[in-house]
Image (tube, rainbow, N blue to C red):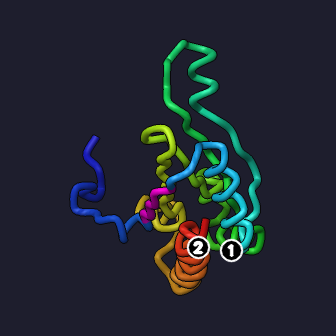
Amino acid sequence: MALPIDPTALGAADIGEERATLRMPHEEAIEHVRETFLDAGFGVATEFSPSDLLNEKIDADREPYYVLGACNPRMADRVLTSSDNRLGALFPCNVVIWEEEPGVQTVYHVSIMRIGRLGGLAPNDEEMRDIIAETGEMVDEAFSNLDAA
C-alpha cells in the first residue's frame, strides 16, 4: 500500500515531536514529568509500564519505559467535535519516559493532533489549527519546565 504522504519528508515540527533528557532516576523522572504536565494544564488519564508488561509476559528484558496518557478535557472535547469523533482513536496524548542508562531518562512526545490531521482523521481547518496551536503551547510549557528539576 502506498502512503498518501512521504514520511521521510516530515520533520519533527510536522508531527509536533518534543524530546528532553532528564538526569535523574527513572521513578523520579516519571513523577517529575507527571507534575510538570499537570502544571501545564493536562490531566493524566492513564499510565502504564510497557517494559514491566513485556518483561513479565515474554521475558523481553526491556529497560524501564513508562507511558503517561495526558489529556486536557476541554481540548479533547473540542477535537472530538472537530474530527467527527475520529481523532479519539489516538487518545490519550502520550508522553513516554524511557531509561537511556541509569540516571538518564528520555522524555518523548508527538502531537496526536498534528498526526491526526496529516492522516486525514481531522480536518485542516481553522478550528483544528487553533486546537493544534493551543495544545502545542501547553506541551511547550511542560517541556520548557522539565529541566526545572
Task: Say which mark, if any, is on residue 124.
Answer: none
Residue 65 on image: x %, y %: 55, 38
**Residue to which mark 1 is pinned:** 40
User: Which residue sits at x=44%, y=60%?
Assistant: 19
User: Which residue sits at x=47%, y=47%?
Assistant: 104
Q: Amino acid at mark 1?
A: Ala
Foreground residue among 20 and 3: 20
- The quadrant of the image that shows the C terminus is bottom right
* SS label for mark 2: helix
Q: Is residue 62 above or below residue 23?
A: above
| Main secondary structure of the magenta stretch | strand
Residue 14 on image: x %, y %: 36, 69
**Residue to which mark 2 is pinned:** 145
Q: Amino acid at mark 2?
A: Asn
Foreground residue among 82 and 38: 38
- Find the magenta span and give its range: 17-22
* SS label for mark 1: loop
Residue 55 on image: x %, y %: 57, 19
User: Which residue sits at x=70%, y=53%?
Assistant: 31
